[in-house]
Image (cartoon, rainbow, N blue to C red):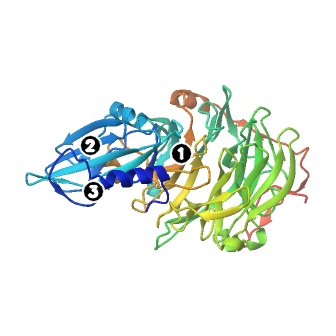
Amino acid sequence: MITRLYLVAFVFAILLSACGTGNHKTGHSEGRLPVIFPDYTSLIIPVNIAPLNFIIKEEAQKYSVHFSGPKSKGFVINSDNDKITIPIIKWKKLLNATIEDSIKIVISVKIKNVWHSFNPIYNYISPDSLDSYIVYRKINPALVLWNDMAIVQRSTETFDESSILENRNTGGNCMHCHTFQNRNPENFMLHLRAPGGTFIKSNGITRWLETKTPYTIASFAYPAWHPTKNLIAFSTNKIQQAMYASGEHLNVVFDDVSDIVVYDIEKNLVFTSPKIASKNLENLPEWSPDGKYLYYINCPIERKLEMGKLVKYDFMRIAFNAETREWGNLDTLLTSATTGLSISFPKASPDGKFIIFCMADFGYFTITNPTTDLYIMDLSNKKYRKLGINSSKTESFHDWSLNSRWIVLASKREDGIITLPYFCHIDEKGLESKAFVLPAEDPESLKTSLFNYNRPVFVSGKVTMSQEEILSEIAKKPEKVIFDSINVAIDSLEGLKSNSGKVETSIYLKK
């Protein structure tokens, strides 16, 4: 169901529909839209998007598709099969000629020597471009085959796809949490686990780190790169996992304990504050676009149930002065008591107007939780609402384009198993359009893929550091990070007994 289209596109479509299909093939009119896969109908699409190849889900002997615009006669594709592959040069030319208007797609099929025409499809061409690349983790959805994965970059303007790093070259270990500073392909980081460390490239300098210290719970986990400084906020977590024997839930990931720390890349120094490293569960840091606030989620320790599986998180922020490294007051933006749901993965738009987050029945790791949906908050008044792009399946990790007009989200809406990247336009008022899947050179692959495409993030260009260069760096002995214990008063290193009686080491600081 479409959530919103620009008024001009809607009016344009109505007027053209009233004039008939204008079909290049005469014959019987079906009086309805054709069924196509993926559902590329009634969309707002960026002017620089790769061709939206599709399959016509109508039984026929021959197929014909006419692409046109109000200022362009366009082109025709005739095919003996139902798969429509659009020439990229003709596609780009048509989109550029139809900015702030709608392209018209007329589909006809030949059945028993009679041509059947369908109502035209209209898609509005937005002048708002997508960032030229997205980066995601490509991983098998079967948990027993997790060791076949790669961090992959894919052009949004073409079908170019290449691996940044494949774990078949790193001993089959886990790789995750790829993050970029302001979508800059030259400044990025990712984790490698068991054994491994954290790899960072910043301003031409690389660091290969062992990030566990005597004062922290564990190695660095979920990251957020400061927009202007060489600082990365991380959670540090004791992560557990449990499997479901039946039902829609596959597994649940939860924390025994968790804190937030900040890593200074230049000084190789990690620091924190008692305000974000307490006995509560602090997690999933995210900087404001101006770097003056750190958003995160928090579960008070008294709310934590046995084994921590059913906890609900609140949405918080704390002021931060990047020059003095001073932390300000805590501010609660939204509580689970208000929503009845658990909040996770906050992500602010680069223009600072909105923040999108997930809410689910419990927990923070929503990637496999079918109850999770996306919500948007207007930061000027803290009003929030559920986005209309949600499906009955899992919607989880998301990211904003640099111009704040697009989001990419990870969704299992196709079959409840495979995660694919979807795009959605968000206008200056925070209103959303219909979501559509990342176009594929072979659209059938969207049905047959055996891989999840997790944690999609926008990048302004292609990562130039080769896989061989990364492998050369991580073959070295990792450098140990230094914990700034001088400016942080350590109260206790004895750890906290959870309800299970298990002792965990954490940063327990004086309040």
Q: Which residue is mark 2?
A: 66
Mark 1 touching mark 2, by CB under 8 A?
Answer: no
Indicate the quadrant containing the N terminus: top left, top right, bottom left or bottom right. bottom left
Badge 3 element: loop
x, y percentage for residue 2? 45, 59
CA gap, disc 1 to disc 2?
Answer: 48 Å
Q: Which residue is mark 1?
A: 173
CA gap, disc 3 to disc 2?
Answer: 13 Å
CA gap, disc 3 to disc 1?
Answer: 45 Å
Question: 248 or 123: which is nearer to us?
Answer: 123
Q: Which mark identifies residue 34?
A: 3
Question: 412 or 399: which is nearer to us?
Answer: 399
Badge 1 element: loop
Task: Judge left or right: residue 451 versus residue 204.
Answer: left
Q: Residue at x 52, y 39 (%)?
A: 129
Q: Residue at x 83, y 58 (%)?
A: 330
x, y percentage for residue 218? 71, 51
x, y percentage for residue 439? 40, 44
Q: Nearer the viewer, mark 1 or mark 2?
A: 2
